[in-house]
Image: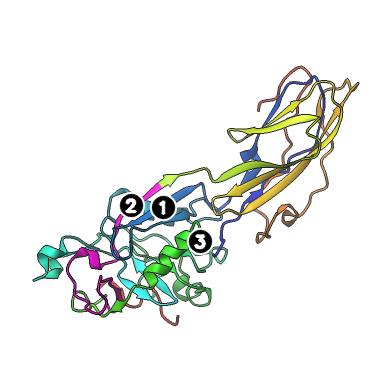
Amino acid sequence: MAEASQPIVTNDLNDIRAVSTAANLSVDLFAHFDDPSTTGLVARFELFASVLGSRVKEVLLFDQAGAGAPLTVQNFLNYVNDGDYVNTFIDRSIPGFVVQGGRFTIDNLANNLANPRNALGIIPTDPPVPNEFSSDRSNLRGTIAMAKPENDPNGATNQWFFNLGDNSANLDNQNGGSTVFGEVLSASDLAVIDAIAAVDIFNGTGLDPAFSNLPLSFSDPRNPVITGDENFVRYSSITVDQRDELTFSISNNTNPGLLNVSIIDEQLVLDYLPDQFGTADITIQATNLLGQVVEDTFSVTVDKNWRGAAAAIPSRAPRPLSASLAFRDPTGSPAGAVATSLSILVRSMAATRLPTSPWAKTRLS
C-alpha cells in the first residue's frame, strides 16, 4: 500500500536519574510521538449485500493540518454527515487505474425499470474545496483522492476515487495534482477495492452519459439483465469515527528488577522497586493505525545514596529522525518539531504527569 502516513518521534524521551524511594513518574506519550497526517479519523465504506457479498472497507483519513489535507477531509465529512453518500455507487471503473464514486445515487430501481432515470439521483454539491495536493501524499495504490473537472485545480466537490495502482506519474502532475486525503487501513480493505475492480464493466450511457465504464454485478453473468439496485456496486452507508491515532507498547526493559514500566491510558508509568539500584534501558514503541512503527529508547539510573533532586541526565546528542524508525524511514523531519525536556521526579514528589484522468468521463454533464 501507499503508506503515506508515518509515525514519528516529536520529542526524545530524556534519560532519567532517581532514587528507589521516589514516587511513580508518569509521562504523556502523546507529547513525544505523533502521526502527523491524521488525528485518527477512520471512514467506513459499507456496501449493500449483493453477489459481491457484504463488504466493508475502512480508510484512514489524513485530516491533520501540516502533513494532512484538513480542508479536503472536512469537505468529505460534510457530505458524510449530511447523509449524501447513502445509496451512492461506483459509477466508473477503469481496470488498473481507479474506481470512482460520490456523484450519483440509485434507489428503488426495481419499481422504475420502465423509466430507470426515476431511480437515479445526483448528489447536490457543496462549494468546491481548495486543492491540497502534496507530493508527500502521492496517488499510490490504496489511496483515496478527489476527482475534479478538467482545467480546474480547485474544483473538487463530491466525487472521490480509489487508486488501484501507482498513478503518481499521471495524477500527481495534471490539473494541479489530485489531492490524496486517505488510505485503506489494511490488506483486507484493499481486497475489497480489488473485488470492486473485478466486477464486469458495461456501457451504461443509455442511463446517463457518464456511465461509459459502469461496473454492474449479476447473479448470472451469462445473462446480464438489470433487475434492481442490487446490480450496482452500491453503498448502504459511509460513516466516520474517531480512534486513537497511535497505540503504545513497551518493547524492551533491560532491567525489570530495577523498576516496573507500564502504560496506562497513553501514560508511561515508572515504578521504582525498593532497594534496587542500577540502570535500565527502556524502549517505547508507537504504532499508528496503518500498523507502522516508530521507537524511542531512554535510560533510567537509580542511585542508592544520591541526595540531589531527581533530574534528567544531560540530553543525548540529537540524532536523525530516521535512527528511531523500526522498519522504515520517513521522508524528512516533522514540521515544527521542537525538542523539549521530560519532567523529572523530585525525591518526595511525583511529577505529573492511465493516460486517463478520473474526471475525464464523469464531468458535470
- What is the crowding at mark 3: few (fewer than 14 residues within 10 Å), some, or many (at least 20)? few
Q: Position of residue 73 (x, y in %)?
A: 43, 54
Q: Is residue 91 left or right of residue 343?
A: left
Question: Which secondary structure, mark 2?
Answer: helix
Residue at position x 74%, y 21% from top?
A: 23
Q: CA distance from mark 3 to mark 1?
A: 16 Å
Q: Is residue 168 above or below residue 340?
A: below
Q: CA distance from mark 1 to mark 2?
A: 9 Å
What residue is pinned by disc 3? 187
Residue 261: quadrant of the picture: top right
Q: Earlier in the sequence, mark 2 or mark 3?
A: 2
Q: Amino acid at mark 1?
A: Ala
Please provide the residue range marked out in magenta: 212-240
Q: Position of residue 181 (x, y in %)?
A: 46, 59
Q: Quadrant of the C terminus?
A: bottom left
Question: Which secondary structure, mark 1?
Answer: strand
Prevailing secondary structure of the magenta residues: loop
Residue at position x 43%, y 69% from top?
A: 194
Q: Amino acid at mark 3?
A: Ala
Q: Earlier in the sequence, mark 1 or mark 2?
A: 1
Q: Position of residue 229 (x, y in %)?
A: 21, 64
Would residue 182 be visible to someone looking at this image?
no
What residue is pinned by disc 1? 43
**Is the C-beta separation of discs 1 and 2 under 8 Å?**
yes
Of discs 2 and 3, which sits in the foreground? 3
What residue is pinned by disc 2? 80
Q: Is residue 254 above or below residue 358?
A: above
Q: Amino acid at mark 2?
A: Val
